[in-house]
Image (spheres, grey):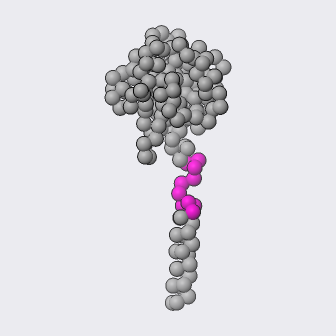
Amino acid sequence: MTVLLILFRRIAGMGLLLGILGFFSPPASAEDEADAGIKAAYLHNFTKFVEWPALVNDTIHICVVGSEPIVNKLGEIASRDLKGHALQIWSGLDDPQICQILFISRAEKNLNGLMGQVRGKEVLTVSDAEGFARQGGGIGFYSDGAQIKLEINSTVTQNAHLKINAMLMEIARIAR
């Protein structure tokens, strides 16, 4: 009986140590996967709450630079209704003129260069880079605890001739 008690205490002690070291927390890739799903859902839903002045062939193009997990998640939800519009998802950016939504990952080193390519165009720029909306992007993702929230730069979106639905503006923080 004492041998089992000693063994149980050692196992419990090791479990506590491993838990403290973070071995029992979800792996980073699982967290990244969940974040990618949330960001993809936001990008998909932006198509319902943003109006573009002109859509070529009634198709909305979402271009994603620097995040294959988001591209994959968008592919999974692409068939959902988009108010009568077709949806095409592009990984990378060959022609910025084709994008209605351009998501640039915070990991992308050429964020400013990509922003320069679409500045003044009818493109909703979105990123998870720190302070993106305050630095001239359209919509920035930011973390508030365990939640991913939005920050909108209404000056940038207006200059791109985009109309953001009031319901989307209500749930977002406005960049100043």
Given the current orientation, which residue lies at the most extreme front position?
A: 176
Residue at the spot 46% in from the left edge and 41% down from the top edge: 143
95 within the magenta span = no
Residue 120, compared with residue 103, is above or below; it is above
Prevailing SS of the magenta stretch: loop
Residue 69, compared with residue 90, is above or below; it is below
Percent x, y of residue 82: 44, 22
65 relative position to 38: left or right: right
- Residue interval drawn in magenta: 21-30
Q: Quadrant of residue 17?
A: bottom right
Residue at the spot 58% in from the left edge and 21% down from the top edge: 115
Percent x, y of residue 65: 61, 29
Residue at the spot 52% in from the left edge and 18% down from the top edge: 123
Q: Quadrant of residue 91?
A: top right
Percent x, y of residue 114: 61, 22
The front one of 47 and 131 is 131
